[in-house]
Image: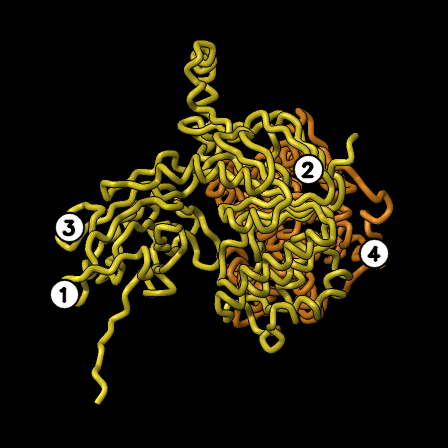
Amino acid sequence: MSSDAIAIERLGKRYTIGAAQVGAATLGESLASWVKAPWRRFTHLSGRSAETQFWALSDVSFGVASGEVIGIVGPNGAGKSTLLKILSRITPPTTGYADLTGRVSSLLEVGTGFHPELTGRENIFLNGAILGMYRAEIRRKFDAIVAFAELERFIDTPVKHYSSGMFVRLAFSVAAHLDPEILIVDEVLSVGDLHFRNRCLGRMQDLRGEGRTVLFVSHDLTAVRQLCTRAVMLDGGRLVDDGTPSDVTRRYERQHHSAARSATGAADRAQPPRGYHLRRAELRNGQGVVTSRFDAGDVMEIHLWSSGRAPENSYTAEFKLLNDDDQVISYGAANPVRDTYYRADDQHFVCRLGPLPLTEGAYSLTFSVGVWNVERWDAWTKAIGFTIERCDLFRTGHGVANINDGDFVINQEWLIGS
Amino acid sequence: MLAVPQAQPARRTLRLEPPRSWQMLNLAELRDYRELLFFFVWRDVKVRYKQTVLGAMWAIIQPLATTFFFALVFGRFGGMSKQVNGPYALHVFVGMMPWTFFANAVTLAGNSLVGSSHLITKVYFPRILVPLSAIASGLVDFAVSFGVLAVLMASYHVEPTWRLAAAPVFVAGTVAAAAGAGILFSALIVTYRDVRYVLTFVVQLWLFATPVLYTLDIIPPQYRLWYALNPATGMISGFRASVLGTPFPVGVILVSSIATVVLLAAGVRYFVQVERRFADVI
């Protein structure tokens, strides 16, 4: 055997989708399908059943040397989550194998198994045990966990009384005290506030310094560039790129981000992921006309459609406004900002935005849905673009462009001193 | 204090590969995860008592109230009390104690996996801990009801005999039977959601197929051994005989014991066969 911490050989995962889906079956349907089995076998031979099977991951092979921090990038539906689920032993592969050498911890979300009725203290023990820590180990690290979360005063309060920030802090603090040789992390770093994200990144950097092996999935290409020693790209369930983080992320950006700009004011998702997902976005002006051209001071209506089964019936939608250089310049979300919660499975979100204080230039919007600060079900990066054609908020006849003058204009009055 | 299994073989390689056609229950792994089982039980008990006003009182009220109504309806109005030696209410209560445990354990365990889908899709642990912890947490209530039993026996002037020493055996048998049925149903419900409704119905009927409200004596002798294929029959009759000091129905207990072992083996067998695809279908 090689000295690799992780060796992945021709790994594949097939899901059965559509009418033959196992999970949606009732016992009655199962009996019915058993009766119909001879017929299905016949159609199977004629090759018709191929469309109900879907390879989320196929023929993926790579090794991760001990001490490497490897970032996995790829568009939604590329197979990143499936790969993590296989390596976390949540689901078995259909073909191939993966060898993991050393103590493995996997972190697909923070706060798995937290119970709202239990106190912070009780949840530390429960969550620690779920993540694979022994009781003696948790007891030893308990004070450090509480101190790291900065929750000494509330440690005996049921976590249902915690704010979402406190909840995430406690959950992350437990996870940060895991002591694995191999750490598998999903997009957990993308939730929470900036302070929290920085601490996550700091902890990841510590692990890197200690020579741990880390496998890290993220949409955040900056984080991948900062943290990882190597990156691989998945697309359509296959490994398509492997190299230095800066090379791989640059190639990824070139392939996947340029097409997102829409000139029409309406965009459909090219390859929506399998789970709950956003599928269409439209921008409308104050008259309800779909357009991608606005003037500063206009009202913009964002229309957003989602599909699938919502994993929870109280969730939020978010947008991030990006400038021409892809920097986030503004943010909005249904529940933390306007105390609005969504419940339906197939949702049509409408957000009225404005008057827009933006300077002339090109902008784009990134959308996401999920439980705010806890879990992000889907993110649609740079889903739709628009331009501000004219920025003349004070009706002076002089425009303000974002090339030299910043991204937005603050309402202002100029006074003449006495 | 604890043997940390990772400590000795410094670098153990774990191979993740497609499920083999014949899966075995990994007992060594279950031993490694026994603390998690403890934490699941601890969580269930804690949450249950935190969320209710009466807390542990429910463990007393539930069997007492059902005993009262059954004693009234079947004993007084239905004339069943004449077929039973000794106080009918005590007779029903002694049957109701293991039955309440059994019925709750099977129902809770059966629905436990679906109720833990957020865990199953996010973290690995032996899945069988979920139904097992649901069963184990019911034992706390069972233990509490022994206090009520002592009070009832004292007030009816029924003295315990040497047969009481056999009670733990029948408690263990009831746990094993509940585990078999609970584990089987939990795996079935993940795959076939409508079995959930079947389970409710099955547990209701099961009560009448078990000598809780009546005794074995009303079953004609030639059918008794068939009747004992219901594992609860032997366990509950045996428990009652050991508490009330009446003779053990040996043949019935023997057949029920075999049925219990078969049910448990079949439940575990089916569970380990399908557990690896739970996360895909839940």
Say few, some or many: other residues with alpha carbon within 10 Å of mark 4 (under 14 / 14 to 19 / 20 or more): few
Task: Identify the amino acid type marked 4.
Answer: Leu
Q: Is residue A372 left or right of residue A139?
A: left
Which one is closest to the eye, mark 1 or mark 3?
Answer: 1
Instruction: Return the residue at label 2.
Output: A64
**Mark 1 Cα within 10 Å, few/some/many (few <14, many 20+)?**
few
Residue in the foreground of this view, choosing between B180 and A192: A192
Q: Which residue is mark 3?
A: A288
Q: Which chain is orange?
A: B
Q: CA distance from mark 3 to mark 4?
A: 67 Å
Kindly state the secondary structure of the residue where label 1 is placed.
loop
The hue used for chain A is yellow
Please check whether the numbered discs 2 and 1 fall on a single chain. Answer: yes
Q: How many marks?
A: 4
The alpha-carbon separation of the residues under discs 2 and 4 comes to 32 Å
For the residues carrying marks 2 and 4, which lies nearer the camera in this image?
Answer: 2
Q: Give the residue pinned by disc 1.
A: A395
User: What chain does mark 3 sit on?
Assistant: A
Q: Earlier in the sequence, mark 1 or mark 3?
A: 3
Indicate the amino acid at tag 2: Val
Q: What is the secondary structure assignment of the residue under circle 4?
A: loop
Residue A93 in the image, given as x and y percentages of width and height: 61, 30
Considering only vertical position in the picture, is A172 above or below A21? below
Task: Point out residue B228 in the picture as x, y percentages from the top left corner.
Answer: 67, 38
